[in-house]
Image (cartoon, grey):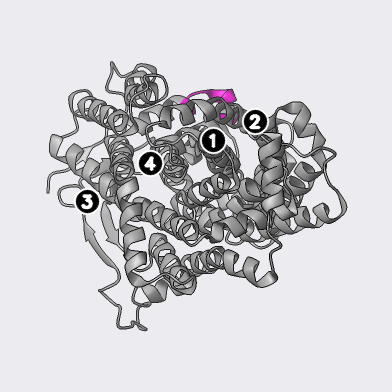
Amino acid sequence: MLTWTQVYTPVFGSVLLSALVAAIPVVVLLGVLGFGHVKAHWAAIAGLTTSLAIAIFVYGMPANLALASAGYGAAFGLLPIGWIILGAIFVYDITVKTGDFEVVKHSISGISDDRRIQLLLIGFSFGAFIEGAAGFGTPVAISGAMLIGLGFRPLKAAILALIGNTAPVAYGALGIPIITLAKVTGLDEMALSQMVGRQLPIFSLIVPFWLIWAMAGRKKMMEVWPACLTCGLSFALTQFFVSNYMGPSLVDIIGSAVSMGATLLLMKFWKPKTTWHFDHESKEARQADADARPNLSFGQVAKAWMPWALLCVFVFAWGYPAFKNVLNGGAKGSENFLKGISLVSFPVPMLDKAIIKVPPVAIKATAEGAVYTLNWLSATGTSLILVGIVSGLLLGLSFSELIKTFLNTLKRIRMSLVTIAAMLALGFMTRYSGLDATMGLAFASTGFLFPFFSPLLGWLGVALTGSDTSSNVLFGGLQKISAESLGINPILSCAANSSGGVMGKMIDAQSIVVAGVATGQQGNEGEILRGVFWHSIALASLVGVVVFLQAYVFPWMIPVVVTAVLK
């Protein structure tokens, strides 16, 4: 098999010039999407075409490898990513069809009519739970859809769901980003969990305030500061404690439960002086809605919340390693009847082991694997489809009605699935061609300022790949090599890659498309991007400041166990 070795400085041997060229596909994608008012699938195709041209004609990547990597990314975009979105919207559509989402809406309004409190509970706390259990865009899809059902305007719901889904991302999907980072870098998993847990709690405290400020303005945010503080501080303290003393797997699950419980408890003893609504909600309409609000029995509320409770149970079960292992056919020596049926893996033709990643991006020359895994049963999207089926039957829908609803959901998001496939094709193409590594080297060459730019490298990785896990795989080794060459503790820089990456989650193309699908804003992805772009950069820069201070002013914040390991 012919192999190709990645080249990182193809433009006159200059890291800076090569990075500028490597950034062109990203600039094209974000530029035409955010400012050219071009539909998302055309923007993705434009970015993909540009990256193919640069990879082949500037980097010298063989055309067959370039096309194979794009195809691999497109397949990954459909399963698991697209499958998750389809399942999440299917569950939502069922609750709307049966009328039970109206009951959910009234039950939440019974806690508080104030849109700010509703946003904290759904956009931050509940979204953090779904992030902790599933990740991969699921919380944005579900939170965005629920906010619309509560009366939020679709565009606003999409933007707020993306901003809210930040602080929990590093520990998403049962801690997989941190676990993967430890495997990639060879560093201690617990130490990485502790270090991220000494960076992100600061932002877990900030984000609820930031979220309400973005929606309602500073003055209206100050009116509910006790709720913002309770919601954020309870999550932050739990995040710190669990990450530092229990490990990365249950950080978001426990933190979100504590955050929701603390906020609900606060609402028993405290209410904002004024009830805030959007400008488009007239006083008359609000009064009519309040007058029409039924007196709900416990049984009615429990029935309406049943699909969402099942969603939490199913998603958590599907993410639990032991159960996922059973669904995949069992471990070696204890296989079950699903072995070889529910999980099928195969090397991507022409691509697997054909591309060599070399220093300084990799610790040593490494052949890049490209194995596509078709885990149709253990995929998170499958759990959501099953939630929809079970919930629909329990809510009184027939099988024919369920099938009709599913097909209508599929029809509604079909172009968005195409967009997601194209976006992931671009991300994989960028990774396998080495364009992202060139941009990473530019960040890593910043010397004394590297601790500040280290989180921004993670931010770039998530913006390109759509995943904190993928960003850690992409840049974890580079972070370690760069830190050691500069005399910086590699635990700090590698953890910063994950912490900074969470702020790129709101602008990655995958998340933008997911938010657009969930809120019915297909075609308005550019507006969503413009709505979150500066929030993303500002928060990522603040992470950079925190890491810089930890490197040079507060080095005692680096876990003591790490120092012992390094010695």
Q: Amino acid at mark 4?
A: Ala
Tell me the residue that label 1 is attached to: 159
Q: Which residue is mark 3?
A: 352
In primary-sequence order, the first of circles 4 and 2 is 2
- Disc 1 + disc 2, Cβ < 8 Å: yes
Residue wearing tag 2 = 214
Residue 362: image tag: 4
The answer to whether one can see residue 542 in this image is yes
Horizontal and vertical percent for residue 518?
A: 45, 45
For the residues marked 4 and 2, what is the alpha-carbon distance in whole angstroms? Answer: 40 Å
In which quadrant of the rendered view does residue 8 lie?
top left
Disc 3 versus disc 4: distance between alpha carbons? Answer: 17 Å
Q: CA distance from mark 2 to mark 3?
A: 44 Å
Residue type marked 3: Asp
Local SS, label 2: helix
- Label 4: state its secondary structure: loop
In the image, the segment drawn in magenta is 443-451
In the rendered structure, the answer to whether residue 468 lies left or right of residue 301 reads left
Q: Is residue 546 magenta?
A: no
